[in-house]
Image (cartoon, rainbow, N blue to C red):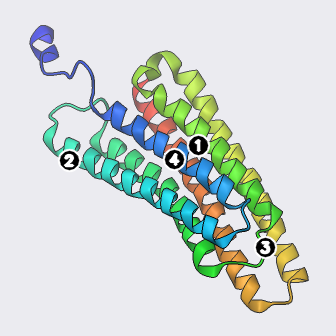
Amino acid sequence: MNNIFDKFVPKEPKFFPILKEMAEVILVASDLITECVQNSDHDTTIEYYKKIKEQEKKGDVLSAKIFDELNSTFITPFDREDIHHLADRLDDVTDYINSCAKRIVLYNPKQMPKEAVELASLIKEGAIFISKAVDELDVMKKQSKKIKEYCVELHNIENRADDIYENFLIDLFAKEKDAIEVIKLKEIMYELEKATDAAEYVGKIIKTIIVKYS
């Protein structure tokens, strides 16, 4: 019976390459937003936004592809709901990066705060850990300890981002006298912080998958 059943099990699960592509999209977008927040020229910022938007669209296509594959695949490497949830959360990280870049272009703040660079760096750091974790999902029974460590790092990054964001707000409200500028910077920084939240959420889903299947 086992031999018969094995014939229906995909030898190379198709979901892992798509999830890895989604992680790569996050990596590229995180590089772009890191450069974007360090740039002071508005025209150049627009070009960064266009490139990030391309990655966001690519992520949407890959997320839709996951959904299509789930509807047409009889046997999946782990629960359909977990795969769909993971793809959605990966897409969220790119969405928040895109949303931040969009606000930078629309609001054109007088100056980006140094904390924006710090948060963008944490997003990049998180993207690297996401990529490592996703890369090893297909061998998670062998690499579960390492993947758990990556997920812990995503949690730590989110905590650091919270601290940076909260301290930034305290300084912003205390020192910035231009109310419009306060609104602009608060919204831009909020999107950066939410990207780190989404990255941590990816880690939580991966940890859940490991508990179930490793």
Tell me the tag on residue 127.
1
Please identify the quadrant where the N terminus is shown: top left
Disc 3 residue type?
Gln
- The answer to whether 66 is drawn above or below residue 141 in the figure is below
Q: Say what amino acid the circle numbered 4 marks.
A: Ile
Distance CA(mark 2)–CA(mark 1): 25 Å
Q: Which residue is mark 2?
A: 68
Residue at horizontal 67%, vertical 53%?
Answer: 34
Q: Nearer the viewer, mark 2 or mark 4?
A: 4
Mark sitting earlier along the chain (4/3) = 4
Amino acid type at circle 2 is Asp
Does dot 1 land on a helix, a strand or a loop?
A: helix
> Would you name the residue on which mark 4 appears?
26
State yes or no: discs 1 and 3 in contact (Cβ < 8 Å). Answer: no
Taking 187 as reference, is 46 left or right?
Answer: left
User: Measured from the top left, where is residue 116 in percent x and y?
Assistant: 74, 62
Q: Are marks 2 and 1 in contact (CB under 8 Å)?
A: no
Dot 3: what SS?
Answer: loop
Neighbour tally class for label 1: few under 14, some 14-19, many 20 plus, Cα within 10 Å: many
Q: Residue at x 58, y 43 (%)?
A: 127
Which numbered disc, 1 or 3, marks the residue closer to the eye?
3
Which residue does the numbered mark 3 point to in the structure image?
Answer: 111
Q: Marks 2 and 4, how far apart in space?
A: 21 Å
Between disc 3 and disc 2, whose residue precedes? 2
- Say which amino acid is labelled 1: Ala
Q: Position of residue 42 (x, y in %)?
A: 65, 72
- Give the distance between the C-alpha atoms of the residues marked 4 and 3, in whole angstroms: 25 Å
Comes first in the chain, label 2 or label 1:
2
